[in-house]
Image (cartoon, rainbow, N blue to C red):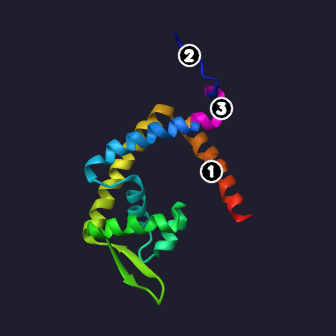
Amino acid sequence: MTLTNSLESRLGYQLRRASAVMMADLSRELADLDLRPAEVTTLLVIAENPDCSQTEVGQALAIKRANMVPIISRLMERGLVDRRRLDGRSHALSLTDEGRKMADDAVARIDRHECRFTELLGATDSDALFRCLPVIRAVRDADAEV
């Protein structure tokens, strides 16, 4: 017997299922780096923004302050991120040489991961998706401002 699933016609359901497939693929691609996706994205934001603060990274990635603490701590324990006092309250984050190598490796792996899905969709559909998804994300940003 084949079950029916009326959720198949729901945008949110389709987005969630597609996200789960992509995250599983990304996790496989990054598995031997021993970094979680949130740690990789944090590493990459710091790589692009040397001397940024932990708060700024959290805001850029929509990660709560309490969740940023263990992410930064683990990256520092692994010798990938350095922290130096910026002022009385905040610290500047930057990558170590090892962190830079790890970030470069992660970007190459993410590129391979992304390529699999953009090739699957084709250029036209990938471009359409890139135009549409930020519209959905903007709703959250607008709600957060209220």
| Amino acid marked by disc 1 | Pro
Residue placed under numbered mark 1 in the picture: 134
| Amino acid marked by disc 2 | Leu
Against 116, is 33 above or below?
below
Dot 3 lies on which element? loop
Question: CA–CA distance between discs 1 and 2?
Answer: 33 Å
Q: Nearer the viewer, mark 1 or mark 2?
A: 2
Q: Of all residues shown, which one is farthest toward the right?
A: 146
What percent of the width, then of the height, locates residue 57? 48, 68
Q: Magenta stretch: give its range.
A: 8-14
Q: Earlier in the sequence, mark 1 or mark 2?
A: 2
Q: Is residue 123 visible?
A: no
Q: Earlier in the sequence, mark 2 or mark 3?
A: 2
Q: Which residue is painted at 62% across and 50% down in the image?
A: 134
| Amino acid marked by disc 3 | Arg
Q: Residues within 10 Å of mark 3 (few under 14, many from 20)?
A: few
